[in-house]
């Protein structure tokens, strides 16, 4: 019996969790090798017979309820968290490769960060927002792609007017300009256009260019709005949510939220991931109970005074965050940071930070 099979059997008999042990069960060829080795070693015939009968029953169960081993492992992964993070990532990595080939694009990092702070009006809050793709490249020349999108909705998904927003980088604060963070984009600056989608979102699209890894593009969008959203609940507007829309095959998602410490109601945000698959329940129109996907990766507390934002996937990120604080005249020590980091995020989905707004004053 070879070392690999022997290692699996040792792990299998010692694993206390029967669900997490399933991937260790050998296939038909491995089971034949194992039972023959047991016979040669003098194992009691009745025990070998019981092992063969149990394996045959397992194969019958798999054929009846799952079809194959791979589907069985996916089904069992939904009833236990043990090892699920690693298994889920391996499945998403396969999807990333397939989606990259299908859509003709991929990126190393998708980045999104929202900053919220008290507005000049006591009932309103300011928002700054950065979003973009790092080392985006095309596999086909004709692949146009949205690098970021912005829209504003009520609880039920109905659209609000986006309102008055400005580019964080003054050089791009013009009505017809794409609001780039110029110092953090690749050179030459990516050629882009603004489109308004059927869903009311403003889409910042990268136009057709060269293909391949030698033509990678980094594009970061930066926007802000003063007194941009309410601090108090109203009918059909009861929670604050900060989305990142995941439509691009990417290796890593970095989704951060920075909360000013005066906004105490937002200092314990919830993280959710929702399907946007056509034909199924789509958030937010279907409501928060439907279409939510399992998340096995933990929320990372970046701390406060100021938050620790270093990330190896994008070494320039601390400078980018400092640029936002400087432009908004905010003190970083007044903010608490939270991060959701996900390898090979599924598409199409939305990942969002959520918190309840304050009760109306009486």
Image (cartoon, rainbow, N blue to C red):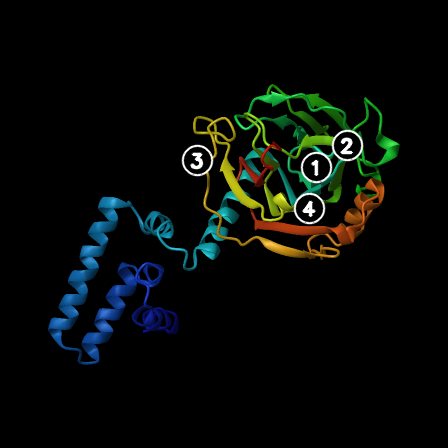
Q: Quadrant of the C terminus?
A: top right
Residue position marked by numbered label 2 in the rendering: 226
Badge 3 marks a residue whose secondary structure is loop
Distance between mark 4 and mark 3 Cα atoms: 25 Å
Picture layout, residue 69 above or below residue 245: below
Coordinates of residue 20 in the picture (x, y in percent): 36, 60
Q: Distance from label 2 to label 4 (Cα)?
A: 15 Å
Q: Residues within 10 Å of mark 1 (few under 14, many from 20)?
A: some
Circle on res. 211: 1
Cα gap from disc 2 to disc 1, whole angstroms: 39 Å
Q: Nearer the viewer, residue 228 or 94?
A: 228
Which of labels 4 and 1 is toward the front?
4
Mark 2 vs mark 1, foreground winner is 2
Neighbours of disc 3 within 10 Å: few (<14), some (14-19), many (20+) = few
> Contact, CB < 8 Å: mark 3 with mark 2?
no
Q: Are marks 2 and 1 in contact (CB under 8 Å)?
A: no
Q: CA distance from mark 3 to mark 2?
A: 31 Å
Pointer 4 with pointer 1, Cβ within 8 A: no
Q: Quadrant of the N terminus?
A: bottom left
Name the residue that disc number 4 marks. 259
Up/down of 279 relative to 139, above or below:
above
Residue sitting at the far left: 46
Distance from Cα at disc 1 to Cα at disc 3: 41 Å
- Residue at image position (71%, 54%) is 309
Q: Which residue carries the number 3 mark?
A: 289
Circle 4: element type: strand
Residue 300 spot, x, y in % from top left = 60, 55
First in sequence: mark 2 vs mark 4: 2
Q: Earlier in the sequence, mark 2 or mark 1?
A: 1
Does 152 sit left or right of 278 as displayed?
A: right
Label 4 Cα crowd, 10 Å radius (few <14 / some 14-19 / many 20+): many
Front residue of this view, candidates 186 and 113: 113
């Amino acid at each position: 019996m070879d070392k690999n099979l022997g290692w699996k059997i040792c792990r299998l008999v010692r694993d206390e969790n029967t669900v997490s042990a399933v991937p260790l069960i050998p296939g038909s060829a491995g089971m034949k090798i194992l039972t023959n080795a047991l016979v040669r070693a003098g194992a009691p015939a009745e025990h070998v017979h019981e092992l063969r009968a149990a394996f045959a029953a397992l194969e019958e169960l798999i054929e009846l309820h799952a079809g194959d081993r791979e589907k069985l492992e996916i089904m069992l992964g939904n009833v236990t968290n043990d090892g699920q993070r690693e298994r889920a990532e391996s499945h998403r990595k396969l999807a990333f490769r397939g989606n990259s080939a299908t859509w003709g694009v991929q990126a190393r990092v998708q980045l999104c960060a929202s900053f919220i702070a008290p507005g000049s009006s006591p009932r309103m809050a300011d928002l700054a927002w950065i979003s973009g793709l790092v080392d985006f490249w095309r596999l086909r020349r004709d692949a146009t792609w949205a690098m970021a999108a912005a829209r504003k909705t009520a609880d039920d998904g109905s659209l609000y007017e986006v309102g008055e927003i400005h580019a964080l980088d003054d050089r791009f604060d013009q009505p017809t300009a794409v609001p780039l963070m110029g110092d953090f984009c690749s050179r030459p600056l990516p050629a882009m256009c603004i489109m308004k989608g059927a869903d009311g979102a403003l889409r910042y699209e990268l136009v057709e260019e060269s293909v391949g890894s030698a033509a990678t593009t980094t594009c970061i969008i930066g926007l802000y709005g003063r007194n941009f959203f309410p601090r108090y609940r109203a009918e059909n507007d009861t929670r604050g949510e900060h989305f990142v829309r995941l439509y691009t095959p990417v290796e890593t998602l970095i989704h951060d939220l920075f909360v000013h410490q005066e906004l105490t109601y937002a200092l314990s945000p919830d993280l959710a991931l929702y399907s946007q698959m056509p034909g199924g329940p789509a958030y937010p129109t279907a409501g928060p109970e439907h279409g939510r996907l399992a998340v096995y990766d933990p929320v990372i507390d970046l701390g406060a005074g100021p938050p620790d934002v270093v990330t190896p996937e994008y070494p320039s990120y601390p400078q980018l965050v400092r640029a936002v604080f400087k432009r908004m005249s905010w003190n970083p020590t007044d903010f608490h940071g939270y991060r959701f980091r996900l390898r090979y995020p599924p598409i199409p989905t939305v990942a969002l930070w959520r918190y309840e707004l304050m009760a109306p004053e009486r």
